C-alpha cells in the first residue's frame, strides 16, 4: 500500500446531519483518492453517526473509522488519529466544518514547495469569526515575529507528521478548554518553517445554528483560566521578557479576556457567572501580564482593562453597550473600468462617531468616567485607520477577498477647532462630545480595482457581494455596498451601480464572465 500524501483526521461526536457537508467536501477533493486518507475517530457517538461512517468507509477505500468510548473532548480522538495516520502530512478538521474542493491539493503542494512543517490555509467563517489580517496575502515563510500567526490557534491546519512525531506533539487530553491553543502555540515555536496560503479558501469554519459546537458551550471560569495559563507558559518558555512576549500575550488578553467581557454572551450571562469570570480576569491581569501587554491594545480595549483593574464591572458593561452600537455606513460608485470608489465612516448610536482633538493628540469619548486621557488616546490608531473594499461569496460560504486599493482618510470638523487644555489625569471625555471644541469625524475614501482572476485564485463561480470594511481604533466594522458587475465575451467589463445587485461570476473554458443578476 502506497504512503498517502495527506491524512485528514476528524474527531466525531454526535454531529447528526452537520457532518454531511464535510463528507461531501472530502469526496469532492481534486487530490486523487489514492493520494490521501481520511480517518474519522468516532468518540462514542450515540446518534447513528458511527454506522453512517462505517457505511462510508465500506464504500471508499481511502476512508477509515476508529470507534472509541466517549472521552468527552476532541483531544483523544485527534491523538489517536495522529498515531493511525500514514500520510506525509496530517490535516485536522472538525466534524461540522468542511473543505474547499482544491484544499488538500493546494495545501500539500504549498507545503512541499516551501518545505514547511506547518501550513495554514485561508479560512472562511460561517457564523463565526476567523482571522482577517493573517490571510491578507501569502506568507511562504511566516514566523511569530513577522506575521500574525498568533491570531490563528485552532488546529485546522496541515502538519508534517514526522514533525509531530519527532517533537511528541499531542493535544492535552481530558474535558478541558484551549487544548488547541497549547498544541498550536507549541508547534509554532518548534517549527522550522510555517507557510500561510491565502489566495484560496481552504477551510470553512462553521457555527451550528444551535450553537452546540464544543467551543460555544458554557464553561467554568477557574478551569478556563487555568488552561489559558498553560498556553502563556509555553510562550514564556520560548521568549524573553520584551516586545515579542508582550505582543503574543496580548492575543489572549484581547480575545479571551477583553473580547469575552464585551461580548453579548457575557452581558447576558447569569450574574454569579459574570462575577466569577470578572474576578478571574482581574487575577490573570495582575499576575501574568507585563504593562506593555495592555499598552499595545487599542483604546476601547485599554479602557476595559483600566475598568477591570479598578474593579468596576458595571462600567465595563456600560462601555460594552456603547461599543455594540458602533457600525459603519458606506456608499460606493463606479469611477472607471472595474474601479470602485467607496466612502464611509463609523457611526454610534447618536450619529457619526466623533473624536476629540486636544494639544495632546486625539482621543475617544466613551460614556464612562475615571479613564485617563492616555488610555483613550487614538492618535496613532487613526493614522493607520483604513477602509477596505472586499468581495464575499453569497450563499453562506463566507469566502472573502480584499481588493487592491488606494485608501485615504479625511478629518472633518464638527465644531470649530479651539484651544482646549489636555484632559486631566483620571478624567475622560463626556457623552455628547460631538459638539465640543476640537470634535471631528473621520471619513474614509477607498478606490479599489476588481480583478476576477485574483478572487479565490480564479475559482470564483457564483454570486458575490461587495462590502466596505473600516478598520479603526481597534474596531473592524463592515457593511454591504450596492454594486453590480457585467463582463461578457468580446466586450470590456462594465461596473454598474445598482441597489442590492449581487456579483455573479461564471467560469467557462477559463474565460471568466461576470453577470448582474
Image: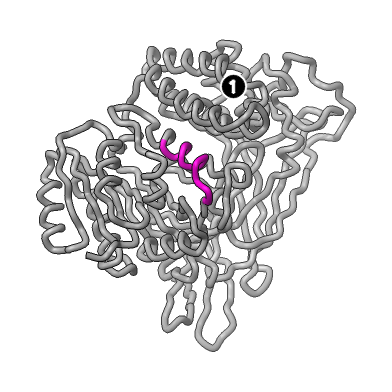
Q: Is residue 212 visible?
A: no
Which residue is located at x 42 percent, y 20 percent?
Answer: 226
Asked whether residue 484 is in view, the answer is yes
Q: Position of residue 227 (x, y in %)?
A: 41, 25
Q: Is residue 433 left or right of residue 497?
A: right
Q: Residue at x 62, y 59 (%)?
A: 332
Determine whether 259 is above or below 482 in the image.
above
- Foreground pick, 201 / 112: 112
Tell me which corner region of the image, top left, top right, bottom left or bottom right, holds residue 422: top right
262 in magenta: no
Residue located 59% across and 82% down the image: 492
Main secondary structure found in the magenta portion: helix
Secondary structure type for disc 1: loop
Q: Report the front residue among 313 and 64.
A: 64
Position of the C terminus, as image quadrant, is: bottom left
What stretch of residues is rendered in magenta?
Answer: 183-193
Q: Which residue is mark 1?
A: 289
Of all residues, the one furthest to the right in this rendering is 419
**Residue 34 location in percent, x, y?**
26, 67
Expressed as whole percent of the image width and height from the top left, the position of residue 447 reads: 68, 61
Q: Percent x, y for residue 397? A: 39, 56
Looking at the rendering, in which quadrant would you find the N terminus?
bottom left
- Nearer the observer, 180 or 376: 180
Count the numbered circles shown.
1
Amino acid at each position: 500500500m502506497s504512503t498517502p500524501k495527506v491524512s485528514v483526521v476528524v474527531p466525531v461526536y454526535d454531529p447528526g446531519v452537520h457532518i454531511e457537508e464535510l463528507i461531501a467536501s472530502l469526496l469532492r477533493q481534486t487530490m486523487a483518492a489514492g493520494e490521501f486518507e481520511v480517518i474519522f475517530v468516532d468518540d462514542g457517538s450515540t446518534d447513528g453517526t458511527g454506522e453512517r461512517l462505517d457505511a462510508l468507509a465500506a464504500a471508499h477505500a481511502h476512508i477509515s473509522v476508529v470507534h472509541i468510548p466517549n472521552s468527552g473532548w476532541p483531544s483523544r480522538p485527534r491523538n489517536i488519529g495522529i498515531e493511525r495516520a500514514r500520510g506525509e502530512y496530517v490535516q485536522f478538521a472538525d466534524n461540522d466544518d468542511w473543505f474547499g474542493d482544491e484544499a488538500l491539493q493546494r495545501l500539500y503542494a504549498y507545503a512541499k514547495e516551501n518545505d514547511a512543517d506547518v501550513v495554514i490555509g485561508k479560512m472562511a467563517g460561517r457564523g463565526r469569526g476567523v482571522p482577517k489580517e493573517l490571510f491578507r496575502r501569502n506568507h511562504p515563510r511566516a514566523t511569530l515575529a513577522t506575521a500574525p500567526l498568533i491570531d490563528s490557534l485552532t488546529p485546522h491546519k496541515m502538519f508534517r507528521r514526522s514533525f509531530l512525531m519527532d517533537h511528541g506533539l499531542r493535544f492535552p487530553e481530558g474535558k478541558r478548554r484551549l487544548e488547541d491553543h497549547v498544541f498550536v502555540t507549541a508547534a509554532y515555536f518548534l517549527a522550522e518553517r510555517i507557510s500561510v496560503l491565502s489566495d484560496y479558501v481552504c477551510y470553512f469554519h462553521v457555527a451550528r445554528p444551535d450553537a452546540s459546537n464544543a467551543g460555544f458551550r458554557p464553561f467554568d471560569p477557574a478551569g478556563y483560566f487555568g488552561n489559558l495559563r498553560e498556553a502563556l507558559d509555553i510562550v514564556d518558555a520560548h521568549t524573553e521578557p520584551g516586545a515579542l512576549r508582550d505582543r503574543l500575550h496580548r492575543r489572549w488578553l484581547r480575545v479571551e479576556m477583553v473580547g469575552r467581557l464585551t461580548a453579548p454572551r457575557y452581558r447576558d450571562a447569569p450574574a454569579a457567572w459574570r462575577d466569577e469570570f470578572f474576578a478571574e480576569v482581574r487575577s490573570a491581569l495582575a499576575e501574568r501580564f507585563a504593562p506593555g501587554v495592555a499598552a499595545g491594545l487599542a483604546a476601547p480595549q485599554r479602557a476595559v482593562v483600566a475598568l477591570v483593574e479598578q474593579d468596576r464591572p458595571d462600567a465595563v458593561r456600560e462601555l460594552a453597550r456603547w461599543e455594540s452600537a458602533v457600525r459603519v455606513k458606506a456608499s460606493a460608485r463606479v469611477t472607471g473600468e472595474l474601479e470602485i470608489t467607496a466612502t464611509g465612516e463609523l457611526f454610534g448610536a447618536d450619529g457619526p462617531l466623533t473624536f476629540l482633538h486636544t494639544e495632546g493628540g486625539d482621543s475617544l469619548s466613551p460614556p464612562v468616567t475615571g479613564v485617563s486621557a492616555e488610555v483613550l488616546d487614538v492618535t496613532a490608531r487613526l493614522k493607520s485607520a483604513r477602509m477596505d473594499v472586499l468581495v464575499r461569496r453569497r450563499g453562506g460560504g463566507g469566502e472573502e477577498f480584499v481588493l487592491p486599493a488606494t485608501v485615504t482618510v479625511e478629518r472633518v470638523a464638527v465644531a470649530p477647532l479651539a484651544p482646549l487644555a489636555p484632559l486631566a489625569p483620571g478624567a475622560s471625555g463626556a457623552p455628547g462630545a460631538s459638539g465640543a471644541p476640537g470634535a471631528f469625524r473621520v471619513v474614509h475614501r477607498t478606490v479599489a480595482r476588481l480583478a476576477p482572476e485574483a478572487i479565490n485564485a480564479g475559482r470564483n463561480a457564483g454570486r458575490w457581494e461587495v462590502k466596505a470594511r473600516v478598520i479603526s481604533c481597534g474596531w473592524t466594522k463592515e457593511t454591504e455596498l450596492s454594486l453590480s458587475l457585467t463582463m461578457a465575451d468580446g466586450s470590456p467589463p462594465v461596473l454598474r451601480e445598482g441597489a442590492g445587485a449581487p456579483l455573479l461570476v461564471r467560469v467557462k473554458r477559463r474565460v471568466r464572465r461576470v453577470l448582474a443578476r
